Image: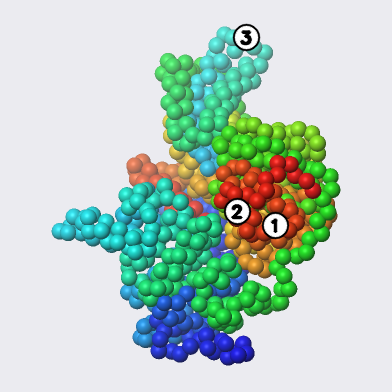
Amino acid sequence: MTTMQMTRSFFLNSAVVGLVMIALLLAGFSAASPQMLTKGNIYNILVQSSYLMIFASAQSMVLLTRGYDLSLGNTVSLVSVITAMVLVSPWGQAAGAPILLAALCGLGAAVLIGGLNGTLVAATGLNPFIVTLGTMYIVQALGSTVSGGFPVSGVPAQFMALSRLDVLGVPVQIWTLGLATLALHMLLKWSVYGRSLYLVGANPTAATTAGVKTRMVTAMAYVCCSAFAGLGAILLTARTGSGEPTLGANLTLEAIAAAVVGGISTQGGRGGAVAPLIGAVLITLLSNGMDLVQIDGYVQQICLGMIILIALTLDRFRR
Amino acid sequence: MNDKQQMQAALGTQDEHVLQMSDISKTYGVNRALDEVSFDLRPGEVHVLFGENGAGKSTLIKVLTGNVRPDAGTLTINGQSCGFLTLRGAKAAGISAVFQEFQLAPSLSVVDNLFLGREKTRRGILARAEMQDQARQVLAELGFAIDLEATVGTLTRAQRQMVEICKALLLHASILILDEPTASLNDHEADALLDVVRKLRHRGVGIIYVSHRMREIHEIADRVTVLRSGRYIGTLPRAGLQEAKLVEMMTGRPIAALYPEIRQDPRAMRIRISNLSTVNGAVKDASLTLRAGEIVGIAGLMGSGKSEIGQALFGLLPIRSGQIEMDGTLIKPRNPSAMLARHLCYFPPDRNVGGLAVSRPVLENGSMTGLSLNMFSRFGFLRRRNERSEVMKAMKAVRLRPLDLTLPVGSLSGGNMQKVLLARGLVRNTEVFVFDEPTVGIDVGAKAEIYDLLKSLVEKGAAVLMISSDLQEVLRLSNRVYVVTEGRTVAELCGDQKTEDNVLKGFFGHAPKIRKEGVA
C-alpha cells in the first residue's frame, strides 16, 4: 500500500471519522457551554447512549446481512408493555421472581417477532424492508391492543431500581455499554456465527456455495436483533417506570442511523462492534449539546439528518 | 525474413495509418503502467492487443478513449497530431470502445439504448420513426436480427454485445476498440461476433481487438502487438503467428506446452451419476462416472446444463430424479455443507458473483468452507491462529501473489482470485474436486499454474471433474470427456476419440458413439 492509499483508508475508516466528529462536537459545544464537560453531563451522555447503543447493535446484526428491521421500535414498545403488564398482574406478583418472569415474557415476545421476521426473509427471499414493514404494523397494533393504548403503570420499585444501580461508583448503564460492545465484538470477530454474518452479507451466493448455511444465518440475525432490542426495552422500561406503548416510536430509525454513522455498511458485510457505540455516542452527544446551547428541536433534526447523509456518503466511498 | 524484418514489415509506413501512438508513458505512483509504448492502426485492419493481465492493455485503451491522460508520448489520429485526448475529443475523433461491462440501460428498449443521450428530436419531441429507421439500417448492414423494441434486459449477453457495437457504429466510429468481446460468449456466439468484425473491417474501420483466445486471434488478426509489464515487446504479422511464440512473448519465458503431461491412473470409483435430472429442467438425463486419480471433463455449450450437473452433485440444485452414488452407496446431496463433509467440493465459475466475497480478505475467503471443522473452530468460536496458519499453507500451495491474507479478494487479479477459490478445497480434506470453468478469464501464466495444481491433485489420487467451455483445456487435460447437450450426456470420449471434431459433433446432436455407462 502506498502512503496515499494508507492516508485515504485511514480517513475513510469509520471509527476514525466517528471519533474525529465526536472530538469536534465536544470542542465546539464545550466552547459554547461550560456545562458540556462536567462529569454529570458526560455521565448523562453515556447513560443515554447506552440504550441507543443496544438498539444500534441489534440493528447492526441485520444490517450486516444487507437487511433492515423496521419493526424494531414497535418491538421495543410491545416488550415494554408486556413486561410491565406481567409485573403488575396478580399472576406476576405471586411468582417467586416477578422481575425474571416478566423479563422472560418480554424477551420471549421479542424472539417470536424476530423468528417471524427471520423466517419470512430467509425462507421466502422477500425484501426485508417490506417484510419488516408488515410486521411493524402488526407489532404496533398488538402493543396498542394489549395495553389498551395507555401506559402500564405501577411497576414494583425493585424493578425501577435496576436503572439506578451503581457498580463501583459507575452507573449500570455504562457497564452495559462496555459489556455489550465487548460481547458484540466477541460475537462478530471470534465466533463462527459472526464470521458467517460477514460472509453472507458480503456475498450470499458465495457463502452458500462454500457451505455456509445462509438462510439459517440470515434468520438468526433477525432473532438476535429482536432479542437484543427486547433486552434494551426491558432496561428502558425500568428507567421510565412504566410500560409505554409508544416507547420505541423513534427508535427504529435512530438505531439504523447510529449503526450507519458508526460505520456499519448498508451494503452488508462491513463494520465492526465499535460502530454502534461510536454512532450512539455521536448522536446522543449531538442532541445533548444542542439542548445545552438551546438549539430548536427541529433544527436538531436537520443536523441529525445531515449527519446520516454524510455517513452514507462516506460508506459509498469506502467501497 | 528474420524476426526483425518481419516486425518492420508489420509496422508498415506511416502515411496509411488511422492511428499512431508513439512512446506513450503513464505512471501511477511508483507503478509504471506504460513505458514508452508504441502502437499503430491502419484502416480496415484488425490489430490484436495481447498480454497478461496488468500488461498495460487497459491503460493503453484508456489513453485512446480519453479516460487516462498519458505522462509522455505523442498521438496522431488521421494524420493530425494531438497531445492527448479528452473523453469528448476521443468521441469527436471517431474512437469508440466496447468494454466487457456494458454501458446499457437494461430496462429500456434496444432503440432507446442505441440513441441514449443523443436522441433525435423534432421540435423537442422524440423522432422515433427516424431513430428506428437508422437503427434498422445499421442492424441490417451488420446482419443482426434483434427486435428493436425488445427490452435490453431480456437479451442474451451476445445480443447485448451486438447492441453495443451498433451503438459505436451509429457514432460513425473509424476506430473501434473491442475489449475481450468474446469473454462471456459461447463458440456459436463468438463466431457470429467474428463475422461482424470481418464486416466492419471490410467497411474500413480500424479495429483494436483485445483477446486471450488463440482461436480468434488466428481467425481474425491482421497483426498482433504484445505488451508485457507496461512495455512494448513486439508486433507479429498474420503470417508469423504461432501460439508458442505469442505465449513466450507474453510471459517472457518459453513455455514448451501450456498443458502439462498428466499421469492419469484411474482407480476406485468415487462418483457414479445415473439418469440425473434436476427440478429446474436444466439437466434432463445425465450419466457419468468419476474415479480417483483421473480428470473427467464435461464439455458443452453455454446453457447446455453442464454446469448444473456439478451444482446438483454439490446440493445446490434440487434433483428431480436419477441416482448419485458415492463410493458405491446411494447419496442425496442436500446442501453444500453435507457434500463438503463427504469430501466433495464444487468450485463455481463466476468468481465475482457466486464464488468469492470480494470485499472480505483472502483469509476469510480461504477458510469459508472449513469454518465448522475442529481445526478452525471449537464450541462455535474461531481458532484464529489455526485458521491463519492453515489458510497460509493453502495459499502457499496455490502460489498466491502477493501472499498477503489481509488483502480484500476484490483487489487481486483474476488469476489470483481463482487461486483463492481453489485454496478453499485445500483447507479441508477434499478428495473429489468439481471445477466449473477453472480458468475462465485468466491470463495464460495463471492458467499454467492452475493446470499444474490440477496435475498435482490428480497424481496424489484426487478425483477431478472438470466442467469447461474451453475445448482445448477439456480435451488436453482429461482422461475421458463427456459431451453435454440440452441437459443430456450425449457422448463419452476416451483415448483417440477425444478430438475437437467429435465434441462438436456431440454439440450438434450427431454424436459419434453414445455410451451410457462409463468404462475406465
Label 1 SS: loop
Q: In the image, what residue type sits under mark 3?
A: Ala
Q: CA distance from mark 3 to mark 2?
A: 83 Å
Q: In the image, what residue type sits under mark 1?
A: Lys
What residue is at 74 percent from the left and 33 percent from the top?
B331
Label 2 SS: helix
Res. B268 image quadrant: top right
Label 3 SS: helix
- Look at mark 1 in the image and give the residue it sits on: B498
- Look at mark 3 in the image and give the residue it sits on: A94
Q: Is residue B214 above or below residue B517?
A: below
Q: Is residue B23 above or below residue B371?
A: below
Is label 3 in contact with label 1 (beta carbons under 8 Å)? Answer: no
Eye-nearest disc, 3 or 1: 1
Q: In the image, what residue type sits under mark 2?
A: Lys
Whichever of callouts 1 and 2 sits on the residue coming sooner in the sequence is: 1
